Amino acid sequence: MVAVLVIEDDDRIRLSLAMALEDEGYTVHTAATAEEGLVRQRREPADTVLVDLMLPGIDGFECIRELRRHDEVPIVVVSARDDTHDIVAALEAGADDYVVKPVATKELSARLRALRRRTRPASVAEPRPTVLGELELRPYAGEVLLRGELLALTRTEFRLLCELAEHAGQVLSRQQLLARVWEYDYGDERLVDVHVGRLRQKVEDDPGNPVRLVTVRGMGYKLQRP
Amino acid sequence: MRRPGLRARVTAGFAIGALCVSTAVALLSYQITERYLLAERESTARRAVLFDADLVHAGLSADPADPLGAIRPLDTGSNRRAFLRRAGEWYSTKVDAGNTTADIPVGLIALVAQDKAGVQRVRVGGVPAMVIAVPLDEGTALYEVDFMNELDRSLRVLALVLTMVAVGTTGGGALLGAYATRRVLRPLASVADAAREIAAGDHSTRLDPAAEPELERLTTSFNRMVDQLQARMERDRRFAADVSHELRSPLQTLAAAASVLSRRREQLDERSATAVHLLTEEVDRFQDLVTDLLELARGDQPVQRAPVDVGAMAVQLCRSRGLAEDVVAADPCSVWQVERRRLEQILANLLDNAHVHGGGAVAVVVRTAGSTHELLVDDSGPGVGPADREVIFDRFVRGRAAGARGDSEGTGLGLALAAQHVTAHGGTITVADRPGGGARFRVTIPLEAP
């Protein structure tokens, strides 16, 4: 059974979401505050965390950062706020996806499934690492090494890098990346931009002047062939 | 006719002022100079004539029969002519005397006849001159004509110089006016710049009250206005965010609870199942309504343009609505500079409108002609009557056919929202009859932002 942790301060939303997700076949852990959620996750880790942004005490952004400090658990923000600032801030804090309330149970379930697919190590046919200059990707093991050192990537960052590496030297548009990594037919391109930014923090020596993961103006992103 | 601008008016004012002042000064100084010079000249001439009169008188006393001999020794130079009138006869040492004596005014002769001396100004052959008469004995008088060529020339030069000075002063006044208005208007230009920046969305723009101490009142009230505007916008934004949050949160509970109920429909009796069905449908519609309303409420936000493949978007949206992909006819390159989210809503709302009111879209055209992008969505429904073609884009207007059917689909905001997004892009949205029946919605968006 896949376990989902729901961190939501509104009792009614928490209860109804828990029921709806249980109907979809998930085991649901709940927490009314970020503090409670963090403790719960440490004690009994869930496979995915759903987190609201407006929480009493530690807010959602801080909660995401705190979760990210310890593990790579996929995080989906479920918030009533649809302000660009909030979305970008939450993604930059480390969230993998962002849905705006009210979200239909079917839609939420689909997002969680997509996230799970991303999370599982890809079923790659050939268990050989892809080497791109100083970068070495081992999709079968879910590992990326830069100059022989293991990088701590979230699953979404990892999938994004694999997708770009598979088409190294080619430009992939934001929509293509959304479709392949997030499985969105048409989605919010900020998801891609923020994740590319986070990935750069880890794979570039100078994230302000990227040389490996470059932006192709008006087209998309490209992982340079060495 | 358009009123001339402030700068033109102030410049003209300065020029006219300078012209008046310089003309007055020029006229006055000309008058004073002329009067002074003439008076000077007159007294000189008078002294000379009195001196000559003594000479002539002495000559005549010596030989009363030779008047010519009496005036011959006079040193009149080139500027003066001396005439002696004795017993009605004119005597002169110059040959052209006959012409000149005709110019001696009769009034002066009459004055001399009363034994009085006199001075009169005349023009002789176009040259200004002064005639001075001094009675000598009974029936005898000395007349001298003093030509004032040089004085006249000097006055002409003076007039010319003064005119030039007046013209120069006027020009200087105009320049000063132009410069002064520019200086005075410069702070206003900075106000205009600041206002433009604020309109463009940079609400942190403020004027520096120290830059122009005289305009401190303007800058402080301007800054206060911007502060209040910003506070007001921030309040509105927060209110919209709060409303959004307060509406979305209970909807989330409703949506999740409805899905739980829906899943157990089989276990419910028929009445309860119908109720759950109604509940679920209405929750969905309410969700759409809230989403559309919140979207409409923040429609005044600036468009964030990025390259978007509209053709691919249309294909995708048609596919997700179960329409055949060959419904879409797009240019080979249909990448537009638009805001993806808004264009997606325009297209989706037009497709949904076609689905609800026109039996589904039968053709979607994405093309660019000249400097406009064009988007056509055709359906084969009953079409839109001429009377409804304007109001159809108003909020909460539903098609007549839909109303007649009692159909509850749609929020009544779809086309209003589409129209708002199109307007935000500087474009137009219209509806007409499709050739062959049905409605044709046409969206045009200019290539570049206006």
Image (cartoon, coloured by chain):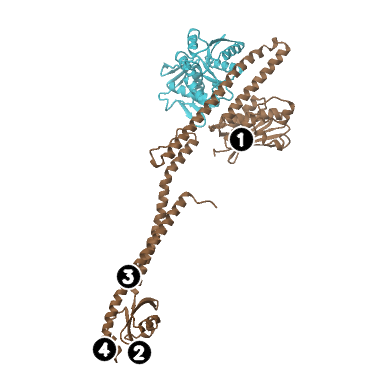
Q: Considering only order in the chain, which callout, 4 or 2, is on the residue closer to the N terminus?
A: 4
Residue sitting nearer the eye, B379 or B136:
B136
| Chain A shade | cyan
Which mark lies nearer to you, 3 or 2? 2
Residue sitting nearer the eye, B436 or B104:
B104
Which mark lies nearer to you, 2 or 1? 2
Kind of residue at disc 2: Ala
Kind of residue at disc 3: Leu
Q: Considering only order in the chain, which callout, 1 or 4, is on the residue closer to the N terminus?
A: 4
Q: Using the image, tell me which numbered label, if any, was put on residue B61.
A: 4
Q: Which residue is mark 3?
A: B37
Kind of residue at disc 4: Ser
Distance from disc 2 to disc 4, alpha carbons, whole Å, reads: 16 Å
Residue at x 66% of width, y 20% of height: B282
Q: Secondary structure at mark 3?
A: helix
Q: Which residue is mark 1?
A: B331
Mark 1: few/some/many CA within 10 Å (<14, 14-19, 20+) = few
Figure quadrant of residue B204:
top left
Residue at x 57% of width, y 37% of height: B426
Q: Using the image, tell me which numbered label, if any, was put on residue A8.
A: none
Q: Considering only order in the chain, which callout, 1 or 2, is on the residue closer to the N terminus?
A: 2
Labels 4 and 1 share a subunit: yes
Image coordinates for residue B422, horizontal then vertical, percent: 60, 34
Q: Considering only order in the chain, which callout, 3 or 4, is on the residue closer to the N terminus?
A: 3
Letter of the chain that mark 2 sits on in the rendering: B
Distance from disc 4 to disc 3, alpha carbons, whole Å, reads: 36 Å
Letter of the chain that mark 4 sits on in the rendering: B
Q: Which residue is mark 2?
A: B87
Which of the chains is brown? B
Q: Residue B107 vs residue A138: left or right?
A: left
Q: Residue B140 vs residue B244: left or right?
A: left
Which mark lies nearer to you, 1 or 3? 3
